[in-house]
Image (cartoon, rainbow, N blue to C red):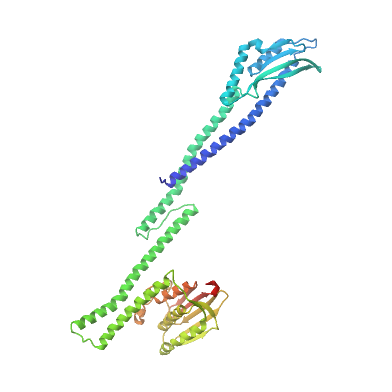
Amino acid sequence: MKYSLRTRLSLSYIFVALICVFLAGILTNLLLEKHFRDYIIKNQESMSREIVSSVSRQYTEDGKWNTDSIENICISALEKGMIIKVSDSSGKVIWDATVHDNSKCQEIISHMAQNMRNRYPGWEGGYVVDEYPIFSSLNEIGKIEIGYIGPYYFSDSDLDFINTVNRLMMAVAVFSFFLSLFIGAMMAKRLSTPISGIISTARMISKGYYSDRATVKSNTREIDQLAETVNNLAETLENQESIRKRITADVAHELRTPLATLQSHMEAMIDGIWEPDVERLKSCHEEIIRINRMVGDLEKLARYEGENLVLTRTSFDISELIRNLVRNFETGFMNKDISVSFSGEEETVYADKDKISQVIINLLSNAQKYTREGGRVEITVKGGNEATEIRIKDNGIGIPPEDLPHVFERFYRADKSRNRLTGGAGIGLTITKAIVEAHKGKILVQSKINEGTEFIIFLPKMSMSDN
């Protein structure tokens, strides 16, 4: 059976409170029993000495006993559960409680024994007699026998005290129960209410309402972190949903034009409007190549973004690789009268050469496309202790600030018309970022409108032993 957080918290408060009261009661009783027993024994000894002292003072200088006073002393002691017998030095009994009132003596002994048995069911005590000598002027003038239930006994007042303490502990337990129930319910409500709100928000998010946010207020750090996590999850899902919709729209848009062109050309040739000559077939072939290139880019992106991307790492000079790739773009740069400069010494990296080549090719291609005629492109390679830094900077058209955070998203276009003219589908930079991150590196972009764009790549230093 599953219980709510509120129920569990309330029960835990009650359980802890009752356990504490129970343990306190047990410890209190154990300590009380021990100290109270010691107190009773010491009190019994003190009372016995006081009785002996009081009786000894009843012996007069002429060798006689004040029997009336002795009787009063002994009757008072009898009320306290002590059976007294006083004898002189010759053995003559001066006063005996059993002779005075034997039935009362038996009743007191029986009552005391019953008190002890009620308190301790396994009690094995019995009647005990202590004998004390009586002195007067350092001369022994007699003896006194004091009988009681031993080794100690509880009187009615003693038992009343113990029972009062137990009743007080019981009252504390009952009070603690209701207090813990109240505090537990209050604390459980304060904890469960914001969590219930977060659960409600999470359910709405699971149903596709990604714009919902948890707005609970709590002074509990973990609850605030949970709300923040759910909100971040909702924001991420909302962004992913937006990207998914945009990807779907962009893919449809990218495929619609070549497919529509192919359809119209094929229908015209089927209907006999156009002759299926080489030029028209070549146009259809170019559209097919364009579609095939886009599908290939999507497959490549899926492979690069996959968790199981395999990198074939080797050690090579990144500067030499970039110089060779720049030579492949010389014709394009010369046609637009773009000057290209490269600076950097030999810098060995341990990476996948083919995939790093793809990164450089994508960035050089973008620099060539978006740099105006007569512009310039600067490439820099610099080694560091922890990473190799590669910079590719142009003075082209730049990227608007609102588009800059999205340039690495698939199918994102900062300039749709220019992208269309150059034939791009908005996947190149996404592939570039995926490759760099697969190497545990990072790529940054800086750009200003009409001033140019700079891409900065950091490839961490690695060796064959780190692979």
Q: Image quarter for residue 267?
A: bottom left
Which quarter of the image is occupied by the N terminus?
top left
Q: Residue at x 45, y 58 (%)?
A: 228
Instruction: Give the residue furthest to the right.
Output: 138
- Depth check, front residue: 33 or 313: 313
| Residue 73 visible, this orientation | no
**Residue 459: percent from left, percent from top:** 51, 75
Instruction: Name the side, left or right, on which 127 lies relative to 196.
Output: right
Q: Image quarter for residue 248?
A: bottom left
- Depth check, front residue: 285 or 411: 285
- Depth check, front residue: 438 or 120: 120
Instruction: Name the side, left or right, on which 183 lies relative to 36.
Output: left
427 up-or-down from 10: above or below: below
104 up-or-down from 380: above or below: above
**Residue 40: percent from left, percent from top:** 65, 26
356 up-or-down from 135: above or below: below
| Residue 40 visible, this orientation | yes
Q: Residue at x 26, y 85 (%)?
A: 281
Q: Image quarter for residue 53?
A: top right
- Depth check, front residue: 355 or 5: 355
Q: Residue at x 49, y 52 (%)?
A: 220
Instruction: Name the side, left or right, on which 128 lies relative to 346.
Output: right
323 up-or-down from 384: above or below: below
Q: Residue at x 38, y 63 (%)?
A: 238
**Residue 458: percent from left, percent from top:** 51, 75
**Residue 43: percent from left, percent from top:** 67, 25
